[in-house]
Image: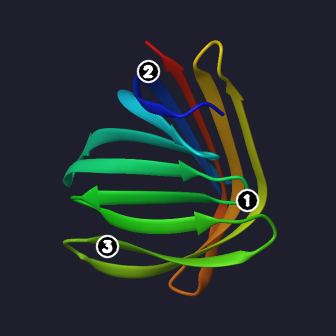
Amino acid sequence: MKETNGIPVRLRQVAVIRDGAHQETVVLEVDGMYYIKGETVYVQFAEENELGRVTNIVKIAPDEVTVLRSGAVEMRQTFRCQQEMPGHYKTVFGRWALATKTDAIEFRYDERRKQGQLFLSYELMLEHEWSGRHTLTLTFKGV
């Protein structure tokens, strides 16, 4: 991949959370930036939620994905296929231990069109209890 200094993108994130028969879908559409350094793609964007502003950085490396959140929510979670990976989630209400067991990581990037798509499928453990299956699809395109 060709290194970039930062390209503005329109980003769409779709998270699907399944816990037994219950399913919830959360969609976020925002503007952001993406960068390429070596073999790693970084996607950065901010969101507003009920707790305040949160800055998100998604680091997409050849063998793993790391999600970093800071601001009103602090989170660090790494995803590697077929591995259980620890993480944490923190708000003003407290800090919780996370872990993920990732089934699938798929990333496609079209340099000519300046667009990409990341797909993650994983089980989430919150405070040492499995809390359901999650999928995350992050699509971005240069603007």
Residue 88 lies in what quarter of the image?
bottom left
Mark 1 closeness class: few <14, some 14–19, many ≥20 residues within 10 Å: few
Q: Image quadrant for the C terminus?
A: top left
Q: Earlier in the sequence, mark 3 or mark 2?
A: 2
Instruction: Point out residue 30 in the picture as x, y percentages from the top left corner.
Output: 37, 27
Left of 111 or right of it: where is 90?
A: left
Image point (39%, 66%), residue name: 75
Q: Earlier in the sequence, mark 1 or mark 2?
A: 2
Mark 3 closeness class: few <14, some 14–19, many ≥20 residues within 10 Å: some
Residue 31 lies in what quarter of the image?
top left
Q: Which mark is residue 10?
A: 2
Q: Nearest to the eye among marks 1 and 3: give it.
A: 1
Q: Secondary structure at mark 1?
A: loop
Left of 82 or right of it: where is 89?
A: left
Q: Nearest to the eye among marks 1 and 2: give it.
A: 1
Count up the numbered dots: 3
The amino acid type, in three-letter code, at marker 3 is: Lys
Nearer to us in this view, 6 or 102 = 6
Q: Which residue is mark 3?
A: 90
Instruction: Point out residue 14 in the picture as x, y percentages from the top left corner.
Output: 56, 36
Q: Which mark is residue 63?
A: 1
